[in-house]
Structure formats: structure tokens, C-alpha cells
Image: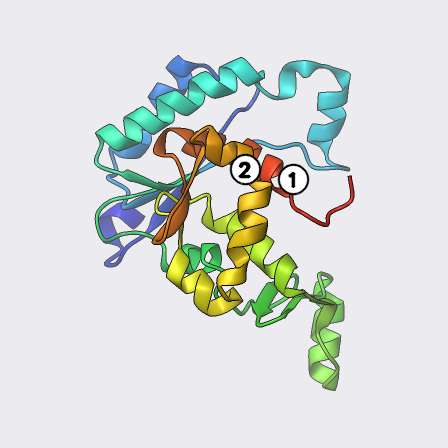
Amino acid sequence: MIAEHWGSSWSSDLLVGWGGQSAASLHAELDELLAFRPPHVSIYGLTVEPGTPLERLHKRGPGALVDDDTAAALDEVWTGRLEQDGLERYEVSNFARPGQRCLHNQAYWRGQAYLGLGPGASSSEGQLRWSNRRDVNAWISAARSGRSTREHVERLSPAQRLLEVLGSGLRTREGLSAEALDRRFSPAWRAPVRQAAAQLLAHGLIHLDDRSIRLADAQLSRADRILIELVQRWPGLPE
């Protein structure tokens, strides 16, 4: 109904990595999804959250999720199929047809300010990041009485914000503009990055020049592991 009647752009989410999923079943799901010609597709790998029935099932045996080898094979399936259908992989888990990239996601990945409204919503602006009360009744009560609806507020240091911006921006195909980072953090951002990413740069996993910092195209699917290594080697962090 959305594909047929919605007059504007729309996005679809596809969950992958559930126990028993195979390349054949994923191909069948992609056949059904792509028949609707979605302008944008986000891929979400199934994760086990604490305190959920899925966690209890996962603890009883390995069948709730696919193994790492199968997950890597499935990554190749959905990446290839979506790109063949004209959707560009512009972020690790996000694909879009020309002109259909998600504006909100791009703002988030670039570390720009965003405002979340309602219970449990998160916001970020300047040095501050905060989240609202998650309990709906508590949020309504606070809003009606004029009290703050915020549950948690933190002030980020420039180094924390830089690491956060790198962690999200390097997940995108274009990476981050060096000029934009210079304006926001001063050119001093380059020194800790070069120190933390020395081996990643030497092996060609990350590219850094006067225009941008980004992952090598072939390494986009390994972004999480590369970013973990970058954080672990960040100067000043405890071992």
C-alpha cells in the first residue's frame, strides 16, 4: 500500500542474521522486497538484547543467530542484490536510489545537532547530549507539571565528540570532510587520529588526505571492527 499510494519517498527495513536464515531464503526475501522498488533500504543484523526471550533462547543453544561465516556470506548476498537493483551502499547498512539518501541519518553521521521528541528520545547539540524519560507516564507527568522531561544529560569533551563523529562518519562511503573537521575541532584533530590509526593507515584500511578521512571502499563491511581498533588505540584512553 505504501509503494502504491504514498506520494513521497519511503524506506524499508530488512532484518538479517536470524537462526536458520540461508542465502536461498534471503534471496527470496529480497525478491519480495525489491518487487516494490523501495527508494531506500536499511539492513539490520539481529542482535541479542539483555533480558529478552531471545537472550534466554540464545543461552540454551546457538540456534538463535547465524554463525559468523554465514553472516559474512549473507552480507555479500544483500549487498550484491541491492546494488544490482540500483541502490547505492552509501553507509554500512543503508542503501538508496539516486537522490533518496536519508537526510536525518546523514546529519547524525556527520555529528550535526538533532532533537528527539517524546519518551525515550535522544538529542544532541553542541557539547550536550541528553535522553528523555523512557517511562511514558513519568514523561507525561513531568511535561504537564512543567518539570524537565530529561532523564540523562552528559557534557562531552571535544575529544569525546571528535571520537563520536569519527565513529559514525567513517561508516559512510564518503567519510568525513577534513575541512569540516578543521572548522569544528581545529586542525589539531589530525594528530591523535594519525597516532591511533597508524597501522590502519599503513595497511590501507583508512585513507586520510587534505580533503577527507574515510574507509577504503572494500573495507566498508568491516567498519565496526576497524572502528573498534581505532578506539582501542586512541591516545589517553585506559588500556
Residue 20 can be seen in this image: no
- What residue is shown at x 61% (from left), y 33% (from top)? 47
- Numbered tag placed on residue 161 in the rendering: none
- What residue is shown at x 58% (from left), y 16% (from top)? 67
Answer with the quarter of the image where residue 84 lies.
top left
Q: Which of marks 2 and 1 is nearer the N terminus?
A: 2
Answer with the quarter of the image where residue 230 lies.
top right
Q: Identity of the amino acid at label 1?
A: Arg
The answer for how far apart the CA atoms under marks 2 and 1 are is 9 Å
Would you say the residues marked 2 and 1 are in contact, meaning their CB atoms lie under 8 Å apart?
Answer: yes
Q: In this view, does 137 lie above or below 191?
A: below
Does dot 2 land on a helix, a strand or a loop? helix
- Say whether residue 125 is left or right of residue 83: right
Residue 28 point in image, percent of width and height: 34, 20
Does dot 1 land on a helix, a strand or a loop? loop
Residue 62 point in image, percent of width and height: 68, 15
Q: Across the whole image, how many numbered discs are drawn on residues?
A: 2
- Say whether residue 175 is left or right of residue 156: left
Q: Identity of the amino acid at label 2?
A: Ala
Depth check, front residue: 92 or 29: 92
- What residue is shown at x 52% (from left), y 24% (from top)? 17
Q: Label 2: how many residues lie within 10 Å, few (<14), some (14-19) or many (20+)?
A: some
- Numbered tag placed on residue 233 in the rendering: 1
Residue most extreme to the bottom: 146
Task: Please name the residue that numbered disc 2 is placed on.
Answer: 198
- Say whether residue 207 is left or right of residue 146: left
Colour basis: rainbow
